[in-house]
Image (spheres, grey):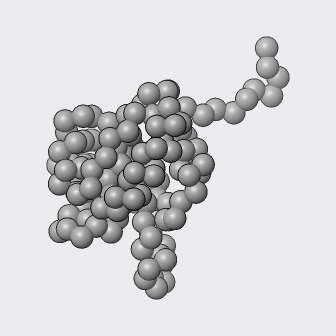
C-alpha cells in the first residue's frame, strides 16, 4: 500500500540518506535511526509498518539484539523485519545467516550492498503490495 511507514536503522548515515530517498521516491513514508537505541524508541513511538535493520553497528545492541528485543521484549511478532548486512563480505564465515524464530527472528535477510530496485521489490513483497497478474484478466 502506498504510504506505508518504513523505519531504517543503520549507523551508516550515507546508507540511511540514500535509501531514504529511494524509498520515498517509491511512495513510502520513511523515518531513520542511526543507533539501535533510537531505533527501538522509534519502533515504540512511530509504529512503522516494516523495519530495515543493519546487523553491524558500533554499540552493544547490534542488529541481532534489536531484532530479538522487538520480538521478545516489545512483543511485536508480526512487525516485518528485513535484516541487511555486509558481514559476509567483511568476514570469512563458513556459513550463511538465515531467518530463524529463536536465534535470528527476522523475516528476510539480505546482503549489502543491496540493489535499490531489489530492496524496494522485497519491501513491497513483505508488505503484501505485489501480486502476480492473473493469467486471464477480466
Q: Position of residue 109 (x, y in %)?
A: 46, 59
Measured along the vertical axis of the image, is residue 124 above or below residue 99? Answer: above
Measured along the vertical axis of the image, is residue 96 above or below residue 40? Answer: below
Q: Nearer the viewer, residue 111 or 18?
A: 18
Name the side, left or right, on which 133 lies relative to 83: right
User: In which quadrant will I find the C terminus?
Assistant: top right
Q: Position of residue 16 (x, y in %)?
A: 38, 53
Query: Which residue is located at x 40 percent, y 51 percent?
Result: 17
Can residue 68 be seen in the rendering of this structure?
no
Q: Nearer the viewer, residue 14 or 120?
A: 14
Q: Nearer the viewer, residue 112 or 74?
A: 112
Query: Which residue is located at x 55 percent, y 40 percent?
Result: 125
Name the side, left or right, on which 91 lies relative to 76: right
Name the side, left or right, on which 42 lies relative to 17: left
Can residue 36 be seen in the rendering of this structure?
yes
Query: Which residue is located at x 49 percent, y 77 percent?
Result: 89
Query: Which residue is located at x 17 percent, y 54 percent?
Result: 37
Number of residue marks: 0
Residue that protrudes farthest toward the right in the picture: 136
Q: Give the quadrant of residue 87.
A: bottom left
Q: Position of residue 51 (x, y in %)?
A: 36, 46
Q: Position of residue 108 (x, y in %)?
A: 47, 53
Measured along the vertical axis of the image, is residue 101 above or below residue 3? Answer: below
Amino acid at each position: 500500500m502506498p504510504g506505508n511507514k518504513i523505519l531504517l536503522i543503520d549507523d551508516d548515515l550515507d546508507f540511511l540518506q540514500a535509501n531514504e530517498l529511494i524509498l520515498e521516491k517509491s511512495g513510502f513514508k520513511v523515518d531513520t535511526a542511526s543507533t539501535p537505541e533510537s531505533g527501538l524508541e522509534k519502533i515504540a513511538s512511530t509504529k512503522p509498518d516494516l523495519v530495515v535493520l543493519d546487523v553491524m553497528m558500533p554499540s552493544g545492541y547490534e542488529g541481532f539484539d534489536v531484532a530479538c528485543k522487538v520480538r521478545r521484549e516489545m512483543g511485536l511478532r508480526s512487525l516485518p523485519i528485513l535484516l541487511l548486512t555486509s558481514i559476509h563480505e567483511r568476514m570469512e564465515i563458513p556459513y550463511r545467516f538465515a531467518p530463524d524464530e529463536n536465534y535470528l527472528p527476522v523475516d528476510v535477510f539480505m546482503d549489502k550492498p543491496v540493489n535499490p530496485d531489489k530492496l524496494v521489490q522485497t519491501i513491497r513483497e513483505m508488505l503484501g503490495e505485489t501480486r502476480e497478474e492473473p493469467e486471464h484478466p477480466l
